Image (spheres, grey):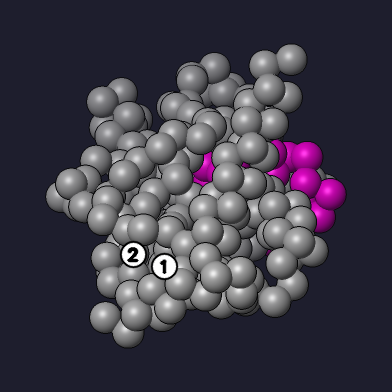
Amino acid sequence: ILEELRAAQDDIRQRQGLLGGQINIGMGASIARTLMPPVITRFHEQHPQVKVRIMEGQLVSMINELRQGELDFTINTYYQGPYDHEFTFEKLFEKPFAIFCREGHPAIGVTSISELLHYNWTMPTPRGSYYKQLEDVFKYRSQIPQIGVVCETFSSCISLVAQSDFLSILPQELGCDPLLAHRLVMLPVTETLPKAAYYLIQRRDSRQTPLTSSLITQFRRHARGILMTERK
């Protein structure tokens, strides 16, 4: 209730021309690394008086804050669940994922997931998201990796892969990341992995403030730019 009052006050002030207030957003880890920085940088340059709070994680960790109005929106992967009727889901784009290991890993050169199943695997939590979708795909193919470590954060999963013999499935773009490319090796297996679809997710009954709507528009534009680049 307090967050809804805060949002209502911000809305009134902004419609009166007082462009301040606070925007609270959620981001999947991959979005926080790629889509978010240029959009937030530009938005902050345009509206330096607006405070922006960014929460990082999978959708399942943000459901309660979205419900209660503590988050205005999130951009995240989505898997069908019991909360579908509460939110709107607007697909923005897809990202390819791949299997990664560390530099010098004994699995380098392997071309089939079946040949990788005896290795140790780590994944972010599969509780509803792209990783839940992956779990379903592996079960259907009868290719079930032994996931001995579940990481609640993306960064801990990446660190574990880079510094051990664990394998994981991560966004393909990490293979070109200037900070990580020398530590991670992508394994080009013959099997196709599903792409991760990212959605703009909002509460169905929410009324966004003018500045929150402006920020959402900027995310949409930047997402369209990513789509156009991928199609070239």
Q: Nearer the viewer, residue 132 or 70?
A: 70
Position of 51 relative to 216 (above/below): below
Q: Which residues are magenta?
A: 161-180
Number of the label disc, if any, that sits on residue 135: none
Would you identify the image quadrant in which residue 66 lies?
bottom left
- Identify the secondary structure beneath mark 2: helix
At x 84% / y 49%, what residue is drawn? 178
Does residue 168 belong to the magenta stretch?
Answer: yes
Task: Assess whether mark 2 and mark 1 are in contact (beta carbons under 8 angstroms).
Answer: yes
Tell me residue 180's x, y (percent): 77, 52
Q: Which residue is mark 2?
A: 66
The residue wearing badge 1 is: 71
Vertical relation: 68 (above or below) 106: below
**Amino acid, disc 2:** Leu
Q: Measured from the top left, where is residue 222 in percent x and y?
A: 67, 39
Q: Position of residue 185 (x, y in %)?
A: 71, 40
Describe residue 32's horizontal placement relative to residue 93 as left or right.
right
In magenta segment, residue 172: yes
Q: Amino acid at mark 1?
A: Leu
Image quarter where the N terminus lies is bottom left
